[in-house]
Amino acid sequence: MNRRIFLTLGMSAFAVSLLPVNLKAMNFRESQPKVWSATKVEQAMIELFGTSDAIESNMKIKAPDIAENGAVIPVTVSTKLNASKVAIFQDANPESTVAVFSVPEGGIIDYSVRIKLGQTGTVTVVALADGKLYKASKLVKVTIGGCGG
């Protein structure tokens, strides 16, 4: 009896592993290199989205008000917008772009990353939804530098 259960579960797991998955990653560093070398948030937004005009939104940015260590700052972004692309920027380091996410159709936006800030700065999240840009920002005060400080 145990052998039958084991074989059934094994074959089921194998069959599930062969199913096609609708996930794909896009390497924005290769396809849009100027986004990653931009030194200002507005410049990075123009390179990524074609414009820097964005509507203030109530997207939720969860980050500490005061970060004791700038090397590891947890940032969580969530929104109910039906966005196709979400980007995280900051203005404390030489390169503004932190992360870019392509959201699949019907995807839930609840992303968590850890970023590095060399000094106190503003974290800005921009989402492209229905052809419009929405943004939200949060100031993070850094007490110990994360970039060698």
Image: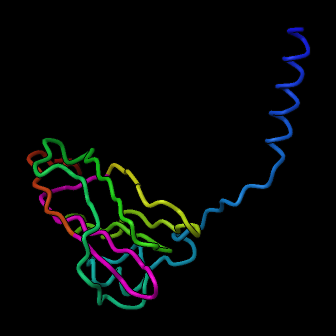
Left or right: where 145 falls relative to 90: left
Q: Is residue 99 left or right of residue 138?
A: right
Position in image of residue 141 (x %, y %): 10, 55
**Colour style of the rendered protein structure:** rainbow
Q: Is residue 83 left or right of residue 133?
A: right
- The quarter in which the N terminus is drawn is top right
Which residue is painted at 82% across and 25% down in the image? Answer: 9
Residue 5 placement: quadrant:
top right
Most frequent secondary structure within the magenta stretch: strand
138 versus 85 height, above or below: above
Q: How many marks?
A: 0
The residue shown at (52%, 67%) is 103
| Front position in the image: 15 or 64 | 15
The furthest residue to the top: 1
Position in image of residue 36 (x %, y %): 41, 72
At a point 46% along the width and 84% down the height, the residue shown is 130
Q: Viewer-proximal residue, 7 or 39?
A: 7
Locate residue 146, reporting x and y percent: 21, 48
Is residue 82 a member of the stretch shown in magenta? Answer: no
Residue extending farthest to the front is 1
Magenta residues (range): 115-136
Relative to the observer, which residue lies in front, 5 or 11? 5
Q: Position of residue 82 (x, y in %)?
A: 46, 73
- Vertical order, 21 against 15 (above or below): below
Q: Is residue 129 above or below residue 101?
A: below
Instruction: Identify which residue is drawn at 29% across, 85% down.
Output: 54
